[in-house]
Image: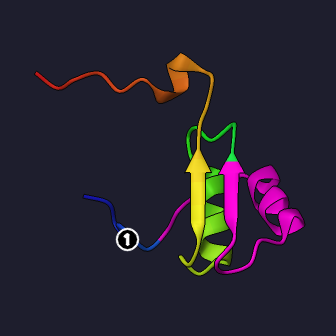
Amino acid sequence: MGVLEGEIFLQNLPSIVNAHALDSQPGDRVMDMCAAPGGKSTALAILMRDEGEIVVADRSHNKIYIPLLE
């Protein structure tokens, strides 16, 4: 369990800048086509106040592959 689990999400500057540049508003529909690991999508959701739709995809198998737990 993290120290501030659920309270802090580290993001890199380009993800934050892209989200602000897009200027999505609550209720908008946005597609992030390079979404893994999720920094831009999270920044968009925050700026949209969790009101709207964010469709995510990524072509990199290595970034999105989650092995099944045994």
According to the image, label 1 marks what residue?
4
Kindly identify the residue that appears in the image at 67 percent across and 63 percent down: 29
Residue 18 vs 60, above or below: the answer is below
Residue 25 on the magenta span? yes
Tell me if mark 1 has few (under 14), some (14-19) or many (20+) residues whose alpha carbon lies within 10 angstroms of its own: few
Q: In the picture provided, is 65 more to the left or to the right than 42?
A: left
Which amino acid, by three-letter code, is at mark 1? Leu
Residue 49 screen position, x and y as percent = 59, 81
Question: What segment is highlighted magenta in the picture?
Answer: 8-31
Residue 12 screen position, x and y as percent = 72, 52
Q: Quadrant of the N terminus?
A: bottom left
Q: Nearer the viewer, residue 57 or 8?
A: 57
Kindly identify the residue that appears in the image at 53 percent across and 26 percent down: 63
Q: In the picture provided, is 20 more to the left or to the right than 29?
A: right
Residue 27 screen position, x and y as percent = 64, 78
Residue 29 vs 33, above or below: the answer is below
